[in-house]
Image (cartoon, rainbow, N blue to C red):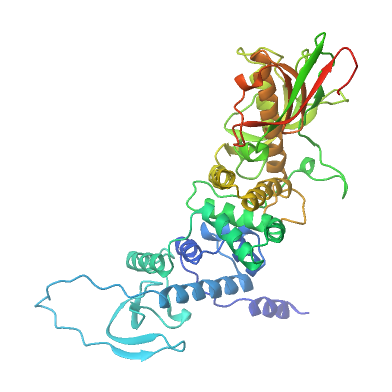
Amino acid sequence: MSDFDAIDSLLKGVGPQATLPAPGIRQELREQARLSKAQVARALGVSPSTVTAWESGRDPAGETRTKYAYLLDGLAAKLTTHTAPVAPPTAEPDAAQPPATAPTPGQDADGDEEEVLATPEPCVLCGHPAATQVAGFAQHLHPADCQTTAATGKPTATATAHTTRTTRRAFQQPPAPEDLIGQAVQAALAQHQGDMETATATLLKRAIPDAMRLLDETRKGARYDVIAHPWIPDILKKQTSRGADQIWEARPKWTRPELPPGHHQVTALDINGAYLSALKTHLPLGQLEHSTGLTHDRRRAGVHLITPPPWEHEAVLPNPIGQRDEPGPLWVTEPTLRLLLRLSGPKYGLCAPPQIHESYTSGATENLLEKFRIALKDARDTAIEQGDEVTLEYVKAMYSKFVSTMGESNYNRELYRPDWMHIIRSQAFANLWLKALKAHDEGLTVVRAMGTDELHVIGDWRSVFPEGRGVTEVKVKDTYTAGTEGEGEE
């Protein structure tokens, strides 16, 4: 191939690109059409985080740009043609201006009312003069006729105002997030003629995509964008296809080595909604960045390589880092590090501070999933109050599968955040550990702590923990007797 052939080959790919509306209008069109970022991403073959970038000002290129422009143009057309005309405000005629000629009626290709304007008006999509009116709004009939302001690439103020007015009237106000859960349950029950067992099985299969849609709905208007597929360091990647990564979650699996003399009644308490409560935790917002040093920045969150301090209270309380056989440094999550720092502080003084060697962190917030958590909690509370077991099982599956599939999973391609998965799990473990500490401080004898939701105690636990099915309450899982005579549990 000659140099000129190579240049000709490059020139074949150069040409006019499809026109895109301003980033704010892209987001407005998607939201008013009640489409999630995940739905748009699937249709265009990209990730939801890419859609976020497009709506924040980055432009796609090539064939993807053409497809995206086609989608947005289609949304704009549907939003506009399905909108009732807005009556203009009543005003006195301006004597200095002659009255405009009445529009000429007609129909466009879809059968919608089309009028030719004698005096062009600003297009609702781009703001430049358009001589045609469809369904009461001036607009260009062909996407190629829509223009953006050359200097800024943004629509004029008039266009923005018209588009906002149009799109907000195009559909009814989208339902509240918890209503999405109720609508899904009602649809499943209707589909299966009220068969609760079959409807529940159907809802459990949909739990992951439905949770992602709920997340997207609760993130609308949020201060921070969810970055769904960031770069991930090797320590957060599985070493083998069926293996694990290098993150230690500090899962408790502890039994008190020795009980006080005599027989005791032990109550096994079940902690309600452990993973649901753990959604309130410090999560890194963006891509993790590497750092070294001995200090912890509370404005950031991630995973940390630490040497944990010795734990000298194993006889009465579990080790905050769980049962670990190998000594030396290990990678822990943000909740584990914060728990160790808290326990080493002046309030408790239960251990020395951990030694921090290096970290992968990003700017963090504790409220990233808070609206998502509250929507699930409200739906769970309502289901319990109404005795609605179908909704209850559906909601449980939504938050538990949401947590378990955001790592390297084939069941959730919309969110790849193994750092979040480990952090949320570790927060659930830390929450259980703090309940064990509270029980100990209130005079109960802690007998066992297991996983996220199992705490065994001796004593008047009702004076310490409220009983019930709410996420701030506990319920009795089992009771048994234990003691020095007749070893073990009966």
| Residue 169 located left or right of residue 373 | left
> Residue 38: percent from the left, percent from the top?
62, 61
The quadrant the C terminus occupies is top right
What's the residue at 54%, 77% (across, down)? 16
- From this viewpoint, which residue is outermost toward the right? 486
Figure quadrant of residue 123: bottom left
Question: In the image, is residue 209 above or below residue 335?
Answer: below
Residue 363 occupies quadrant: top right
Q: Position of residue 281 (x, y in %)?
A: 61, 36
Q: Is residue 294 visible?
A: no
Nearer the observer, 361 or 321: 321
Q: Is residue 318 above or below residue 190?
A: above
Q: Is residue 316 above or below residue 128?
A: above
Q: In this rendered view, identify the residue nearer to me: 479 or 350.
A: 479
Q: Nearer the viewer, residue 162 or 263?
A: 263
Q: Left or right of 114: which side holds 362?
A: right
Q: Residue at x 37, y 72 (%)?
A: 124
The extreme top residue here reads: 261
Vertical relation: 118 (above or below) 213: below
Q: How many marks?
A: 0
- Give residue 302's position: percent from left, percent from top: 67, 36
Relative to 336, is 113 on the left or the right?
A: left
Q: Is residue 16 visible?
A: yes
- Between 32 and 394, which is closer to the camera in this rendering? 394
Residue at position x 38%, y 69% from top? 166
Instruction: For the N terminus, give its image quadrant.
Output: bottom right
Q: Position of residue 29 (x, y in %)?
A: 47, 66
Tell whether 390 sits left or right of 220.
Answer: right
Q: Which quadrant of the view contains residue 154?
A: bottom left
Q: Residue furthest left?
A: 95
